[in-house]
Image: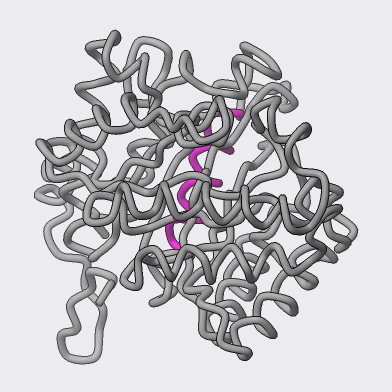
């Protein structure tokens, strides 16, 4: 049970040992502090960086208790040719994770992007789509049974306006591809934790409301959807961010019977052109961590990358994005210390 570290004496709340707490915060890793809250603290992990960057590997193996495979489990990497599965890189990552007692999150079984070229040629109708999708899901889940027992089964299925995204799976199978994917994953590993994962769904809006309604209906019909992943990619300049709205939404997700995971958090800075950017970044990370700690159903808090030089924001949007907890030299930023403070106190 996650709990806040307060001691009640004579009806007053006393914060004990500020000096000792500061010392502990400095000396302890995120991983060690999160263990005291029964919380998985995670990061997405890249194969090449893990093997080639010593600083990256050190931070990955000491600061985090959970890894999400960032790219190497996507369909184009895992099944580049039909029926030819490439498990080599992920197997190596699994081995390293096991050596350091780190849990793994499989990402992702079904997505409308990162598809190998052969899919568009072989998937031509519902029957062929179901055969391809079922085979892909079950091969991965069975192969990693016992090593990876939490999966983002379906990723980013909804548009911002609440309609389903136009993907090859929707065009050939229809909306049923979502519940079918969960059923096939459950068949392959009855003990796995199965999540739906998306961005822009950490607060109530057209997208998240449509998502919750559909997932809740499927769950009531017996579809094995265990949890919902909130990616939580945040723009520091976005005035719509609201800790209270996030807390309200997490409570609704919990009340609907779903587990919750913050799955891909980062806070990009390139659109906030003032000297307060690092403070805003730290505050955003801290706010979401606090909501997670205050929500019993939230059992995982994962950031989408370790250091700023290994981030999709840096590579795809701007080198000024600097969205993560460690800078390009692997040095901790204010956001890192803010998370430690939230975990400690």
Is 27 placed above or below 210 here? above
Residue positioned 28% across, 70% down in the render: 4
**Vertical relation: 127 (above or below) 310:** below
> Residue 166: x, y in percent?
86, 48
On the question of residue 159 being in view, the answer is no
> Residue 307, image x and y in percent?
41, 22
- Boundaries of the magenta span: 277-290
How would you classify the magenta stretch by its main secondary structure? Answer: helix
On screen, residue 147 versus residue 325, left or right, reads left
Any magenta on residue 73?
no
Query: Which quadrant holds residue 30?
Result: top left
Give the side of residue 14 with respect to residue 260, left or right.
Answer: left
In screen coordinates, is 200 left or right of 69? right
Residue at 23 percent across and 65 percent down: it is: 38
Q: Please name whichever residue, 184 or 205, is drawn nearer the observer in this view of the structure.
A: 184
Q: Residue 261 in the image: x percent, y percent?
A: 46, 60
Q: How many marks?
A: 0
Q: Quadrant of the N terminus?
A: bottom left
Instruction: Locate the C terminus and report the quarter of the image it occupies.
Output: bottom left
Nearer to me, 98 or 329: 98
């Amino acid at each position: 049970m996650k709990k806040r570290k307060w001691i009640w004496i004579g009806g007053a709340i006393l914060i004990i040992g500020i000096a000792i707490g500061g010392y502990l915060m400095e000396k302890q890793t995120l991983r060690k502090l999160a263990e005291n809250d029964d919380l998985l603290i995670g990061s997405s992990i890249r194969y090449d960086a893990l093997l080639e960057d010593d600083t990256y590997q050190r931070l990955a193996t000491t600061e985090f208790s959970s890894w999400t495979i960032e790219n190497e489990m996507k369909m184009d990497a895992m099944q580049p040719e039909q029926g030819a599965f490439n498990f080599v890189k992920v197997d190596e990552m699994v081995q390293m994770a096991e050596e350091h007692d780190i849990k793994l999150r499989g990402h992702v079984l079904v997505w409308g992007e990162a598809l190998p070229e052969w899919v568009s040629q072989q998937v031509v109708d519902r029957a062929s789509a179901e055969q391809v999708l079922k085979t892909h899901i079950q091969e991965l889940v069975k192969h990693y049974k016992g090593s990876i027992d939490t999966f983002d089964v379906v990723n980013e299925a909804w548009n911002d306006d609440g309609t389903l995204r136009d993907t090859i799976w929707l065009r050939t199978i229809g909306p049923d591809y979502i519940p079918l994917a969960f059923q096939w994953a459950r068949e392959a590993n009855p003990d796995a934790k199965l999540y739906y994962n998306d961005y822009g769904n950490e607060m109530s809006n057209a997208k998240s409301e449509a998502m919750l309604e559909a997932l809740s209906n499927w769950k009531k019909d017996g579809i094995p959807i265990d949890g919902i992943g909130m990616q939580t990619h945040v723009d520091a300049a976005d005035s719509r961010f609201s800790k209270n709205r996030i807390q309200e939404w997490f409570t609704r997700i919990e009340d609907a019977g779903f587990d919750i995971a913050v799955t891909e958090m980062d806070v990009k800075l390139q659109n906030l052109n003032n000297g307060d950017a690092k403070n805003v970044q730290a505050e955003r990370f801290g706010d979401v961590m606090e909501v997670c700690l205050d929500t019993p159903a939230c059992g995982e808090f994962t950031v989408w990358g370790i250091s700023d030089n290994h981030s999709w924001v840096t590579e795809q949007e701007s080198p000024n994005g600097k969205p993560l907890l460690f800078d390009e030299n692997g040095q901790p930023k204010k956001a890192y210390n803010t998370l430690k403070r939230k975990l400690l106190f």
